[in-house]
Structures are given as C-alpha cells and as structure tokens.
Image (tube, rainbow, N blue to C red):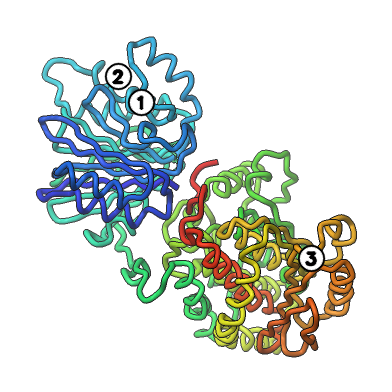
Amino acid sequence: MCGIVGAIADRDVVPVLVEGLKRLEYRGYDSSGIAIADAAGVRRVRRTGRVAEMEQAAAAEGFRGTLGIGHTRWATHGGVTEANAHPHISHGDLALVHNGIIENHEQQRERLRALGYAFESQTDTEVIAHLIHHHMVQGQAPGTDPGRRLLAALQAAVKELTGAYALAVLSRAAPDRLVCARMGCPLLVGLGEGENFVASDVSAIVQATRRVVFLEEGDTAEIRREGVRVFDAGDREVRREVHVSDVSLASLELGPYRHFMQKEIHEQPRAIADTLEAAIDVGGFEAELFGARAGEVLRGVTGVQILACGTSYYAGLTARYWIEAIAGLPCSVEIASEYRYRDAYADPDHLIVTISQSGETLDTMEALKYAKSLGHRHTLSICNVPESAIPRASGLVCYTRAGAEIGVASTKAFTTQLAALFQLTVVLGKLQGRVAPEREAGYLEQLRRLPGSVQHALNLEPQIAAWAERFAGKHNALFLGRGLHYPIALEGALKLKEISYIHAEAYPAGELKHGPLALVDAAMPVVVIAPNDRLLEKVKSNMQEVRARGGELFVFADQDSNFTQSEGVHVIRTPRHAGVLSPVIHTIPVQLLAYHTALARGTDVDKPRNLAKSVTVE
Ligand code: HGA
C-alpha cells in the first residue's frame, strides 16, 4: 500500500517518477504527488484522484528536475485531501514520502509543536518530515557537510519513531542525494549508470534498471548519482547483495485486455503451469521444491498452522481439507491479524505456513514473527514476490509463479497458491507415509491436467457474463458450498463485494437453516458451488430449502452433477469433475461472475474504492 518512487540523475526525472507512480498506482490511488529539489528550493505538486491528474498539473507547472520523489497514497491517517497527500514538506526545505503508520505520531506532534513546528496536515507522516528537519538543524555545527547531516538526521529521527515506515527524503540543503529508510514496509534501491533510484517495488523502476538492492529491516541508505551506501539499524555501513530482477514488462502492461483483473483471470492456465513446472519436470513431489533442508524439516512436523489474510486465508482454508485428508496431519488456519494478538498455543513440531501474494502483508509478517517468538522453529512461506520480506523471514519457501498481479482483487495469485499448497500436501503425505507411489502418480496426472481444465472453465465466460447482467441490479447475494468448496464460496463472495460493491456472504450450505435462510426471498440470488462430490445430495437438499422460499439459484456444477435448468434454477456446467482439485476449477466461474457483474455496474474493477494492494499497514 502506498507507493514510493525516487530518482537522482543527470536527466529530468519527472517522467521517471510519473511512470513509476502509474505502475505503483495499484498500491494506493486516493491521491498522489511529487517533489523535486535543487539548490534553489523544493517544489511539489499534489492532487487527489488519479496519478494522471497529478501528471497534468505537473506538466502545466513545467515541473522538471534531476532529483525527485513521488508517492501514491492509500490514506490511513487523515482524509483524502490535497493537504494530506504526500510529499510532506518541512520549512520549505525538506520533502518526504512515507508508506506505513507512525504509532507515536501524537507524542511526536506535541513535542514538535512545542519546538515551534506548525502542522498543515492530519497525517502521521508530517511528524517525520519535521522530526528530520529538527535533527538536521540541531546537527548544524559549522563546517558540517549538509549531505552527511541529512543522513544523520534521518538516522536519528527513525530511532524516535515507533510503527512501520518506508521513507524517501530530499532536501534543498543537500541537492546531490536522496536518503531513505525502511522498517516494516518494503523498499528497494535501483542501481543505474550515473543515476540511482528508490522504490516500493521493482515495477516502478524496471524501465530504468533491473539491478536492485532490497533494504532490510532497520536499514537506511544514501543515494547519489555516483553510488549508493547502505547502513544497518546500528548505522554501520553494510553491503547488501545486488539482485537482477526478472519481472517481465509484458506482465506490467494491459495488452489487449480491458482490465488487469480480466488479464490475470485469463493468465491462470499459464500461471498454474509455471507454478507446477518444477514438480512436473521431475515427475514427482519432492520436498526440495520448498528448499534444500525441506525433507528433514517436513518429515518431522506433526501438524500445520496456516496464517494468512483475505484471499490467501481462503487458500489456506482449502488446504486444510487437503492436508488433513491426504497428509493425515492436523491443520488449523487462522487470520493473521487475529493470531498475532492472542495467547496462541504453540507446538514447536507444527509447521507454520504463511501465505501472502506480495510477501509484505504486514499482519502476516507480524503473525510469523509472533509464531517464532512462541517457539515455532519450522516456517514455510508461500509467496508470489521473490526476495520479499515474508519468504526472507521463513525457513522454507515456495514461490508461486503467477507473475505480477496488478488488479487489486486477487485472482491468479489465489489459484497458484492452491497449486502450491496442493504440492505441499502431497509432499507432506509422502513423508508421512500416507501417499504411496501409485497415488502420487495419480495426483501428478491430475495436476498435469489442471491448466487445461482451468482453460475449459474460462471458456464459460459468455454464459457467466449473461448471468452477471442479472446480478448487476441486486443489493445482496449468498454463496453456498460444502466441504472443499466452502472456501471457494467464501472467495466468490469476497470477489463480488470487493469489485462490484454488492453485499455478498458465503455459508457452508448446511448452515443455511441455522440463520441465513431468513434472508432468502426472490430478491436474493443464491450462488451454489455444486460439483459431483460426496456432498452433492446434501447440497441439493439445501438448494430445495432455498427454492421453497422463492430464492433464485445460480448453480455451478460439473458434467456429472446431473442438474437440469428449471424455473428459478440456472445451471452452468464446468466440463468434468476434477476430483480433489475441483476447488481450483470452481474458482474461475466465481471470479468471472464478480468481474462481469462489476463491469455491468460500471465500477472501477482494477482499483475498487477504499482498497489497495500489498497491505503493508495494520
Ligand atoms: N500513514 C500515511 C501513509 C499511509 C500508507 O502507507 N498507506 O498504505 C498516510 O495516511 O498518509
């Protein structure tokens, strides 16, 4: 959330900042701004609304400069106003952009007010700008180099902050550098030729450079045209490894699609195939898929605790069914923001599995740290972004290979997480002696067929789009599933509310009679995920309960489910029962239903109101 980009070069960096912000816009899109500095002073332009509006304003004001920072905001403290948009400036001299939340901002504000600082915004961020300025002024011994003072002031200021931050700062007094800091929110430095960059993620700067250094927790850095210096939390200069990013430009472009979400839904066969490639290539499920030491670790675990948020949590819920049934291990799944604040029972022989698309989800990261503090020794991360914080903090890792996911509503990240979790299940099952070679071969064959079956499900798009027309005028919807498909009902309801703003809830179909049936009338569409599994007859009875109350049913079934259309019962068939992988197939229609309903309602599909991607705040 919130996107940061900064650049120092011999050329005009404003186009680099604007393009970077456009690429980061999925992280936050309520307002944006840029600031540039030279020896004459600091100038900024800010606008509420989209980056394109800010870009126009910058062009109208003839913004140019060789040193600049930019920000796209997802407000946490203070409303969506121009005054609250970043960059924030102190004394006309120092400008700063921030991602995160400063928890002690009130105390710092009081202190700075007493020191004579005036505040122009309601943000927590503005205190950081004044605090750095204060330290800069304090360190003003005659002859002290202002560039060194800027870094020293940043390093002193961050020690007085509690909370989470990624920061990029520039000052008129030191027009030859940017300084930046990271704690709890992602930040990387991009290395160019005679020019260098800072950004929340590599997509923002990939057109300028692919060589990046990921800052670690507590790091600060000084970025000049001629080079970059990184310092650890103790202000000691350190070397950090240089990585060459392989993010593809095509994955950041819309191509022939209308929305990134649509593109990403259609990329799923490829994304799943890429995620499964390693297992399919070796022709089996080897522990080494999760890291060199994985065999030894996974053989010894006696249970699994999954921690995640949002869509990733639903991937975890699906995996629980697999892990208990196939690997025979107890598995619990918990929302990370709940787990991290309760006195949880910890069995050190249980494996902690965290799931996060971005690898930066703050609640998940904190839940992981908490689990370790409770004595958990075995940790595994399922993540889509290499070198992000959560995999780096985990013993074992499985990277999904979905490619960049730009749409705020997660789609291909979810199905690739399911693919990864299924691989983990079978590896655990083998190590527990519960999956014999014939069974393993059967699972591998099912996985091989999975991308093709997903493609078949995508072919249902025209039928689903026709249903979506009927949903567009509704205010509420219910999603039902049982067993393995209950988490898919949850995911379907989440997708619909996220992007179409229709209130949608999901229930295990057997729960209907315990309360939600009271909501059912002719105005309530009820979506049912009803493949031909051993719960099908039970689901059919639950559907009768809905029909008897005048509810209209929209049923996703497979060929063998034996449903016929009738008055008030609409049926779309996925081609063939996909066995234990059926939840992956049934995810596609609920994604498409949400997408087309949002389209019919004219909402902003890729940037739904109030949301943003990569949730790096609590
Ligand atoms: N707290 C700051 C930054 C918000 C943020 O990082 N969002 O993801 C603000 O409200 O402006």
- Rounded to the nearest angstrom, the CA distance separating label 1 from label 3 is 60 Å
Mark 1 / mark 3, whichever is N-terminal: 1
Left or right: 175 as drawn, with respect to 289 = left
Q: Percent from the top left, x then y, of residue 346?
A: 72, 47
Q: Disc 1 residue type?
A: Ala
Q: Disc 3 residue type?
A: Ala
Q: Nearer the viewer, residue 475 or 492?
A: 475
> In the rendered image, is residue 292 in sight?
no
Whether residue 18 is situated above or below residue 446 in the rendered picture: above
Q: Nearer the viewer, residue 217 or 296?
A: 217
Query: Is disc 3 surrounded by few (<14), some (14 to 19) or many (20+) residues within 10 Å?
Result: some
Q: Percent from the top left, x then y, of residue 526?
A: 75, 67
Mark seen at residue 251: none
Mark 2 / mark 3, whichever is N-terminal: 2
Query: Nearer the viewer's eye, disc 1 or disc 2?
Result: 2
Query: Is disc 2 surrounded by few (<14), some (14 to 19) or many (20+) residues within 10 Å?
Result: some
Give the residue pinned by disc 2.
Answer: 134
- Rounded to the nearest angstrom, the CA distance separating label 2 from label 3 is 64 Å
Q: Ligand 1 sits in which quadrant?
A: top left
Q: Nearer the viewer, residue 292 or 212?
A: 212
> In the rendered image, is residue 357 in sight?
yes
Circle 2: element type: helix
Query: Nearer the viewer's eye, disc 2 or disc 3?
Result: 3
Residues tagged 1 and 2 counted as in contact (Cβ below 8 A) = yes
Q: Disc 2 residue type?
A: His
Examine the image and state in which quarter residue 232 appears.
Answer: top left
Q: Percent from the top left, x then y, of residue 304?
A: 70, 60
Whether residue 525 is situated above or below residue 192 in the rendered picture: below
Circle 1: element type: helix
Whether residue 584 is situated above or below residue 352 in the rendered picture: below
Give the residue pinned by disc 3.
Answer: 522
Give the residue pinned by disc 1.
Answer: 157
